[in-house]
Structure formats: C-alpha cells, structure tokens
Amino acid sequence: MKPFAYGKPATTAEAVRAVAAEPAAMFLAGGTNLVDHLKLGVASPERLVDVSGLTSAEIRDDDGGLVIGAGVRNSDLAADRRVRERYPVLAEALLSGASPQLRNMATVGGNPLQRTRCVYFQDVTTPCNKRSPGSGCSALGGYTRHHAILGASDRCVATHPSDMAVAMAMLDARVHVIGPSGERTLPFADLHRLPGEHPERDTVLEHGELITDITLPAASWSRRSTYRKVRDRASYAFALVSVAVGLSISDGVIEDVRLAFGGVAHKPWRAQRAEEVLRGARPSEDVFRAAADAELADATALEGLDGGNAFKIPLAARTLAAVLRDLTAEERDR
C-alpha cells in the first residue's frame, strides 16, 4: 500500500479546503468502497480527509419531504419509518444492496459516489480508461455481461453500481454540496455523468466538493413506489438490471410517474421516454410494452467472451412491465 497522510478537520469548510488544496487528496467517510480501492491499488491518494462526524447524521422533515444528512448510515435510512411510508422505493433499494455490515457503515453522501465494479477497472494489470485515461477499455471484446446497454461510449462501457442512487434519481431528489466556490444544489439525476470522452469522471462534482445533504420532495407518486433488482444471485450481488418506479393513479389513469433503470448505464438512467408514454394512459400490457420499447429503442448490446449482454435488453423490458403490472394491479382488476 502506498503511504498517505490522514487528517480529521473540525468543520466541513476545513475539510473542503484541505482536499481542494491537494489534487491527490480524497474525502473519507464510511470507506466501504474507498478502502477496497486502496487495497487493490485502484486508488492511491496522498491525503485522506476524514469527514465522518462532520456532515449531518439526521433525517428531518421538510414541508412534507425529507432532508437527509450525508452522514446518515444506509441502514438507518432504510429503517426510518418516514422513508418506509413515504418513499418505499428508497428503503427497498437500500436493503437490496450490499450486506447488513456494509449498510451499517456506508453513508448517504458516500453511496452515490461509489465507483464501478467493472472487473477491468478493479484489475490494475489491465488497461482501463476510467482508471488510467487514454490506456484503452479492456471490456470491449472482453467480459461484458454486467456492462452498459445505454449511454456508453467507445471509451467506457462500465455501469454505475449503486442501488440507492437509482431510487434517488427516480424520486427527483436534490443534492446539496459545499466546495471551494461555496454552496450549490443540483438535481440528483444530474449528479452522475455518461462516459463520453472522459470516463474517469463519474460525476459533475469538482475536486473538493462535498455532499452535505440530499432532499426528497413531497410527492403523491412516491408513496406508490417500488424497486426491483435482477441479479445473478440472491444476495450481495450487483444488478444486471434494476427498476425503480413510482406512480399515482386517478380515475383509472396514470396521472404521474417517475421511472429509473439501474445496471444499464454509466449513471442511474432516468427513463423519461417511458414516462411520457405512461403519463395519461390507462394501465395495460400494451402500454407497458410501448413504454419499455420507447426507452430501450437506442439500447445497444455488447459482444463478449461471456456471450455478451444482449439479454439485458429484453430483461429490462420484462422487468419494467412486471413492476408496472404489480403497481397497477388493483386498477386493472376493477
């Protein structure tokens, strides 16, 4: 392991200044992803700035919504009564990720910033544009079962691993950050980037910017919501495809809807084309298929040594239809 300096500032402002001052400095919170990268040699910071205990670990009501401190543990967020009642999709997404031990350590501010689990990214003996810009992408023509079908580039086909992030994107959450230039707020759906020419950048955050809170809005469609994760084994596995859906129904018509996919792109994928098809429609199998077809029209399968990932396209369509079927079963049975 490469030696590094360690510091624990007294305030978030001090932490931001400490990281911003050193290009090779990084924040440390729960460390559930970063510690793995230190062991693997994927990350080699010269300084770690510990922010545990600096950001809020509280969940508070806010005009019908919730403000979630970045220091809240994933297990505490999943167990919160208000989250389970108002945002069941978020509780389900959190409980489908990792193990209880990791959820007890992982933080709300750190979870969205975890990096891809692409085997080539984590293997420092192989070329990887995300780990070493300009070195190439070993996944192209390699093992691609878990890789992207939407929004990929010829530089990177990796997918984002977070379950929580998919639910947050679907919920129209907002992210509050503090950085060298002050404070700002952005939609959670805009936090992550597609790979483009710079896959080494996972998010739009500038060096030294720190997530302080995430806000969830009050919404009728968030109460009728769910998260479904399809994976190779029942526990401690990342999504091949996941779907987060929330909707409201009035007089047998889908009044409003929010939808996001996980496991299919470099970022949580807000399925706005599918939302447009569903909004104002009466629930039916034909409508569900049309929504899936609209969203997946640009999906591109990858060939690979393991048979590729073409199966993900129909899998995503079937999973979306199944979730919509379950959420609208009462209305369709009338």
Image (spheres, rainbow, N blue to C red):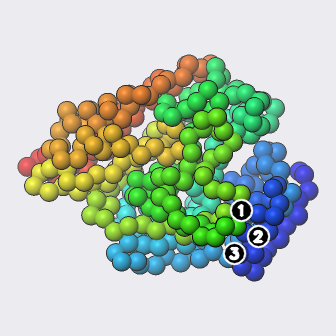
Numbered label attached to residue 12: 3
Residue 301 seen from this side: yes
As measured in the structure, the alpha-carbon distance from the residue carrying label 3 to the one carrying label 2 is 9 Å
> Of marks 1 and 3, which one's residue comes earlier in the chain?
3
Q: Amino acid at mark 3?
A: Thr
* Nearer mark to the viewer, of 3 and 2: 2
Numbered label attached to residue 208: 1
Secondary element at image label 2: helix
> Of marks 3 and 2, which one's residue comes earlier in the chain?
3
As measured in the structure, the alpha-carbon distance from the residue carrying label 1 to the one carrying label 3 is 11 Å
* Identity of the residue drawn at 63% across and 47% down: 202
Q: Amino acid at mark 2?
A: Arg
Numbered label attached to residue 25: none
As measured in the structure, the alpha-carbon distance from the residue carrying label 1 to the one carrying label 2 is 7 Å
The picture places residue 303, in percent across and down from the top left corner, at 56, 19
Q: Residues within 10 Å of mark 1 (few under 14, many from 20)?
A: many
| Residue most extreme to the front | 181
Q: Amino acid at mark 1?
A: Gly
The answer to whether residue 274 is left or right of residue 177 is: left
Q: Provide the residue designation for mark 2.
A: 17
On screen, residue 266 above or below 126: below
Q: Nearer the viewer, residue 177 or 271?
A: 177
Secondary element at image label 3: helix
The picture places residue 195, in percent across and down from the top left corner, at 60, 38
* Identity of the residue drawn at 23% across and 57% down: 248
Q: Nearer the viewer, residue 94 or 165?
A: 165
Disc tally is: 3
On screen, residue 168 above or below 17: above
Q: Are marks 1 and 2 in contact (CB under 8 Å)?
A: yes
| Residue most extreme to the right | 3
Secondary element at image label 1: loop
The picture places residue 97, in percent across and down from the top left corner, at 53, 52
